[in-house]
Image (tube, coloured by chain):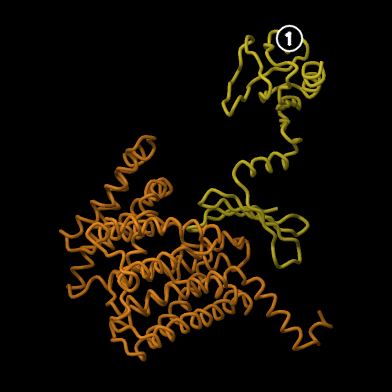
Chain colours: A yellow, B orange
Amino acid sequence: MALRSLNLPGVGTKYEFETDKGDTVAIFFTKNGTIQMYTLQKGCRTPSAAEMTPVEARRLGNILTGAIIEADQESVEIAFSALADLRITIHTFIIPGSIAGKTIEDLQIRAKTGATVIAVCRHDRNIINPPPTFAFEAGDAALVIGESDQIKMFETDILVG
Amino acid sequence: MEGLVLALFVCLILALITKYLSVPAIPFYILAGVLLGQAGLGLVASDQMSDFFSEMGLIFLLFFMGLGLKTERIASNRDAVLTSGIIDLNVNMLIGFVGAYLLGFSLIESLIVAAAFYISSTAMTVTSLIENRKLMIREAETIIWLMMFEDLVLIIFLAIASAGNQNLIIFFVKILIVLGFLYAFAHWGKEFLISILDRDDELPIIFTFAAVLTTASVSTYLGVPETMMVIALGAAFATTDPDAFEQHARPFKDVFLVVFFVFFGVTINFSGGANWFVIGVICILAVVSKFISGMLTGLAIHGSALSGLEIWGNTIGRGEFSIALAVLYGSPVVATTIAALVIVTSIIGSFTAKYSMSLRRGVVRMGRKKSPSHRIHS
């Protein structure tokens, strides 16, 4: 698989590579900010194309790197192969009404699950490293970091229980 | 003033409609100008203000063109770029020139018509390649470099045409000095330029606007055409951070260029001796000659007539640069002819670009019907 990148005047940057099976994938970052992805099956003449916004392209990237994505919740697992194959999962959860008004301290998130809330997105504003006194509201998107078991515990014990 | 506002308002509506239908807006701006101006309803007339805005439009168009010129961008497949560029230049210049001359234009007029006839619209071509999702097809690269080549030819043409009666050697020495000065400024002042461009306040925009305007007005004192100076400024700035300059100059270019197009239409006057027969023949020739050059390029570069068809379909539209030539050097009759040329070819071109894939499929199918033996073997 050889990746070719090319600057096209007036258009933008092109990345293209051929897979081992002979299919071709090309990505164009156009000057007007959209990203176009083309795939060309081996032996075919006309490629098929999809145009994406940068956000959509990042989502696609997350899927391709092996993360799981559900409707509103997504998670990324990062493996640090140098650190004894340490695997860290970052997962987003939408806070349900059942725990609205409770603080991180009340819920004893760290003690019960070992996972940590590292950021909360509320009405398009991000709160990074919320303090223990931080109270959740229904509809907040919480970014939780931990091992995959800890994340599962967060989902079963904190959100549901 | 009221005329300008009315024209801008009409263009705003046209922009909305053309974006919605994803067709090129340039021909409709010109048509709107023709309808509103002296050839039509007579509601809008050009005045000092609109003249200034139009001039700004032209200057920013050329500045953008300069920004796109990057010396290190010489293609890896230089032979292919040269081959396609030279085919395109020779075929279209020749047909345009001979056609115009035989139709009764003077030698100089024929040259201007030929240049406007030769140069396809880079803006329309690139936009249609992106919008019609054609970036990956193998002809796309050929087409994009072809546009680059045409831009370079236009710069050389502008340099020669604007030299006029001056002594050519002195003229080019002057241009070289200015170019050297601008490059030296961009080179030694690179850090200063980038520090300005990196700010998030209004400074980068003011600086970009002032730099372009200063360059344009200083040129008058030096006796160097402002068109060349502004392109040179763009090319010199392209060595620092062209994307940032594009971003800061885009609002000016977008607004002023619309005024430029619509007031080009306003000043068109059909009673000035423009001949419908001549215009019709030129428009047909314009489509045919790009077909010939496209086919030759397709066969030479990709070894396929179908590729030629694709190249043709995407390069029919003439646009912003043809109009720039008409405004800079055209007599009223030439300007009217070029206006019609741009309107007709850009509308035809937008359809051929959109449906070239179906066209190719149609041609392949027809070929199969005529020779059924092919089908058995394939």
Q: Is residue B239 left or right of residue A102?
A: left
Instruction: Single out the residue that lies furthest toward the right.
Output: B376
Residue B98 rendering spot, x and y as whole percentages: 38, 88
The quadrant the N terminus of chain B occupies is bottom left
Q: Is residue A50 left or right of residue B100?
A: right
The amino acid beneath tag 1 is Gln
- Res. B49 image quadrant: bottom left
The quadrant the C terminus of chain B occupies is bottom right
Q: Which residue sits at x=73%, y=27%? A: A89
Is A18 drawn above or below residue B293 in the view shown? above
- Res. B42 image quadrant: bottom left
Subunit bearing disc 1: A
Is A138 drawn above or below residue A30 in the view shown? above
Instruction: Single out the residue that lies furthest toward the bottom.
Output: B102
Residue A99 rendering spot, x and y as whole percentages: 73, 16
Residue B371 rendering spot, x and y as whole percentages: 76, 88
Q: Is residue B235 visible?
A: no
The residue closer to the viewer here, B69 or B21, is B21
- Res. A131 image quadrant: top right
Mark 1 nearby-residue class (10 Å; few <14, some 14–19, many ≥20): few
The residue closer to the viewer here, B304 or B24, is B24
Q: Is residue B55 visible?
A: yes
Q: Which residue is mark 1?
A: A108
Is A110 drawn above or below residue B302 in the view shown? above
Q: Which residue sits at x=32%, y=61%? A: B58
Residue B126 rendering spot, x and y as whole percentages: 51, 62
Q: Disc 1 on helix, strand or loop?
A: loop
